[in-house]
Image (cartoon, rainbow, N blue to C red):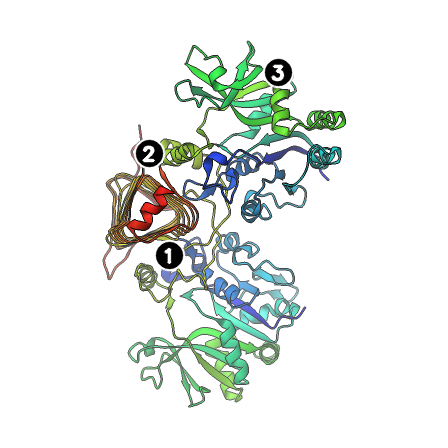
Amino acid sequence: MNTEMLAMILAGGQGTRLGKLTRFTAKPAVPFGGRYRIIDFALSNCSNSGVNTVGVVTQYQPLELNAHIQNGASWGLAEKNAGVTVLQPYASSEGEKWFQGTAHAIYQNIAYIDLYSPKYVLILSGDHIYKMDYEAMLAYHKAQHASLTVGVLPVSMDEAPRFGIMNTDETNRIVQFEEKPKHPKSNLASMGIYIFNWAPLKKLLMDSYSTDGRMEDFGHDVIPAYLNRNEPTYAYAFHGYWKDVGTIKSLWQANMEFLEPDNPLDIDDRNWRIYSRNDALPPMFITETAKVHRSMVVDGCYVAGEVDHSVLSQNVKIGTGSVIKDSMIMPNAVIGKNVTIDHAIVGERAIIGDGGQVIGSDDDIAVVGFQEVLGRMEEDK
Amino acid sequence: MRESEMCAVIDLNEPSQDLAPLTNERPVGTMPFAGRYRLVDFPLSAISNAGIRTAGIFLPRSSRSVEDHIRSGQAWDLDTITGGVFSFPYVATRDYSDPVNIHRYYDNYLTFLIKSKSRYVFITGARNVSNLDVNALLQFHQASPNPISAVYRSVPTTMADPDQEGFVLGEDNEVIGFAPSHELPERTSDHTKPISMQMYLTRTDYLIELLSRVQNSGEFTRLPQLLHEEIVSAQANAFEYTGYCATIHDIQSYYQANMDMLNEENFHALLFSQRAIFTKNKNEAPTYFAPEADVLGSLLGTGGQIEGQVRHSVLFRNVTVEDGAHVADSIVMQSSHIGKNAMLSCVIMDKGCIVGPNVKLQGTSSAPIVLAKGTTILDQAAAEEVLQS
């Protein structure tokens, strides 16, 4: 088999900063925007970019992620001699292969990558919300005769100290990498998106793990090694909506931005659709007692209360007299009657009994966890 | 191949002339329903929920929309390695006075039935929208004396369409006659009539024998007619279906069945029961409700953009209702667009219709205005023209 470019999505993150939302699920499987899970963006970008061989590297709580991805058919990725493969850590005669870091996870899956003998390997993270054409990035990589191309996002100089910053020369060649610099020299933040020529990367990883085993992380170890060895390493600037949803606050914020009619993510763009695995659910039912404004609602929802500036995911029920404001409600959550929810994220399958209150603020988003039950419902007669 | 318990025949050759213009380019079976579905989803889901993995689809004259919808049958678990969807094309030019063609007509059914290696066959159309438990029908059949079972529902005499056909039932609830509803005796206990749902269950070998017999006789009788005769001569066991059912046979019944889904009880009975209704999946974005949106008592599909007022209506996916528009008691199909300050009441808009700003279209619930697929009405003069024609 010969595949020009194969993608590896690093989806093993525990997402501890998402607290109760990721207690039973991996971060890339966290719901977003009513119909999606975070990893749908990377998978759909692959599909739309013609990258049809994708390894999804998982590690932490992979059950829901596995159930979601299945054979990749939902993203049009279930072709012969291609498709999505979920890659779990495994034990071999050399011992356990628990992933120590991003680069180590690739090292452990060399056998999988070599099955397809790709010329290029695209490394992606499974926890970002964005639409990006990886084919265009590959064209750039080839035009520059690069060995490594790093996707970078121009950020404001104020924000730059929070990111890994790439300092480049006038040809966009990366000359220096600084992790969270106090006094940044550039505003090009690494997006954790890399295109590597596979042969030299494989050699670097093999050499490292047959000696000192230091090449654990791309940002921390591999990029500095490439720069030291003078490998042609270029920055590819991405101009568009990109959001890391690694914290409760940023996840909430991304969902609120998703509600803006002129959100640059442009979810309605039919030329770059975001696909997901969806159950066949009835259309949304908006009852005679409902009020819905400035909100996104999807199939399977039953709304009898008021919903203002909020995102409702599949199969969410909102009882009469309840008010949902500035919140994101995840799939299969049931909200009883006369409940108030404000500035909150309500986790999957959570149940909020009649009269319940879940109230947060701009600085402190309230969270109801996965399957958490608050209060109880009165019996319907 | 493993022998399977049941296979299904879905015959999509159903009368559609009274549903024009909605059926100009599609059979009754692919008419959009309840904001998300096509009518054929109901029989396909019923067989899927009963564990049936082999279905023969007898295609109508216009089959493009059927093929596009069903594809591999994956949405109904019909794309398994044993079984699958087998479609049989309709040949409009076929002359059934020619013995070769008569022979071929029965051969299509026979080949499918023999190859299915099933013990029982469930036969249905798509125009009776319902959520039938086919396994319950099978159990009923297995416990009943006669070789074929037929499904009916009890319709109050006052509601029965005089032309719809039903059963004359004998003392043991067996079918002894088949006639239009106005000729049927009323059941005095509850003032209802047993109306046929055109769904049958029989042993596969029994149907094979029946079809072979007719094939060899040289006569030509289409399967639905054959079954009408057979249920009387074999005194079919009559199985009563008690859930929600609507027969889609004209514009009025189609409109009413969609409006029925705005009643929560009907909605839950048909669409939200333990037997889910499956359909082809579309990756639409969520529906956006703008600050001015004002929606009550309605069903909406995904991908919509709602800025205006919507009352007691069924909106399919990807519908836009612009600012100031009022939509009431209407059915708006996929990708239709309603312009600023337009006023629609009791209108059925087929797929991809455009109603321009300030246009008023006012139908009645007994005579809704129907806009054929792709109709564009940019101003009131154009609206009057469409209403005249």
Give A77 or A118, whichever is nearer the viewer.
A77
Q: Position of residue B151 (x, y in %)?
A: 54, 24
The mark lying in front, picked from 2 and 1, is 2
Same subunit, tags 1 and 3:
no
According to the picture, the residue beneath numbered tag 2 turns out to be B365
According to the picture, the residue beneath numbered tag 1 turns out to be A33
Give A274 or B149, whichever is nearer the viewer.
B149
According to the picture, the residue beneath numbered tag 3 turns out to be B235
**Left or right of A180 on screen, residue A227:** right
Cα–Cα gap, marks 2 and 3: 40 Å
Q: Chain of mark 3?
A: B
Q: Position of residue B114 (x, y in %)?
A: 73, 34
Instruction: For mark 2, give the secondary structure.
Output: loop
Q: Chain of mark 1?
A: A
Find residue B215 and report its image quarter: top right
Residue located 47% across and 34% down the image: B18
* Dot 2 and dot 3 residues touching (CB under 8 Å): no
Residue located 58% across and 43% down the image: B77
Q: Position of residue A198 (x, y in %)?
A: 59, 77
The correct choice, above or below, for A264 with respect to B99 in the image is: below
Give A274 or A343, whichever is nearer the viewer.
A274
Q: Quadrant of the N terminus of chain B?
A: top right
